[in-house]
Amino acid sequence: MSNIQGKFGPAFIQALILCVVRFFTIPWRIWKGTAFRLAAMREMNEEDKTVDETSEFPVFTWIKTAWDGIIFLSWPVIAVVAFIVLIGGLFTGYAATALGVFLLTLIYGYFAVIMLSLFKESLILLLTIAINVERIMKKGTLNNTNDS
């Protein structure tokens, strides 16, 4: 019991950091990682681009990169939408409501990156499983024909 008491405080603090602090910082980390991946892709040399273009799974590669583009563009689009809502509310005389909707739109947009990334990761996981099953089936077929 004394072992648990000595670990409770650090465990509690770590749990708070993981569940509260990281919840608010993970959207920024996701968006920043996406920006770096897209910038690196833009700076790829011709040899790397050729490898991507001749990939056996061009749609898979495109989906991965397209979702990075969607995640990256989500914040600018949300900012424009929030600004339009704010201006529209100010011109129609609903300033307080417009300010509230503006802030809610920004908050939603900030955390929407988490859901977009989760969807991308789930989709990539499913596609990776399908690709690996196809490769295993091809290897199994090749092994069966070699045994004959």
Image (cartoon, rainbow, N blue to C red):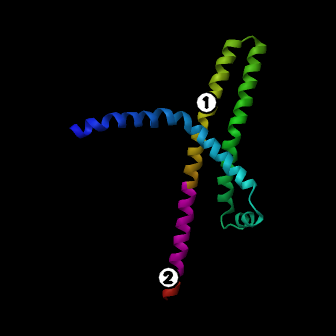
Residue found at the very far bottom of the displayed protein: 148
Judge from the rendering whether residue 4 lies leftward or rightward of residue 47; answer left or right. left
Q: Badge 1 local density, few (<14 within 10 Å), some, or many (20+)?
A: few
* Numbered mark located on residue 19 in the image: none
Q: Quadrant of residue 138?
A: bottom right
Tell me where residue 78 appears, x and y as whole percent: 69, 32
Reading the image, the residue beneath label 2 is 144
Residue found at the very far top of the displayed protein: 93
Q: Residue at x 68, y 42 (%)?
A: 72
Tell me where residue 83 appears, x and y as whole percent: 74, 25
Residue span colored magenta: 125-143
Which residue type does callout 2 highlight? Asn
Q: Residue at x 73, y 23 (%)?
A: 85
Say above or below: 30 vs 60. above
Q: Quadrant of the N terminus?
A: top left
Tell me where residue 135 appears, x and y as whole percent: 55, 70
Most prominent secondary structure in the magenta stretch? helix
Q: Badge 2 local density, few (<14 within 10 Å), some, or many (20+)?
A: few
CA distance separating discs 1 and 2: 54 Å
* Numbered mark located on residue 108 in the image: 1
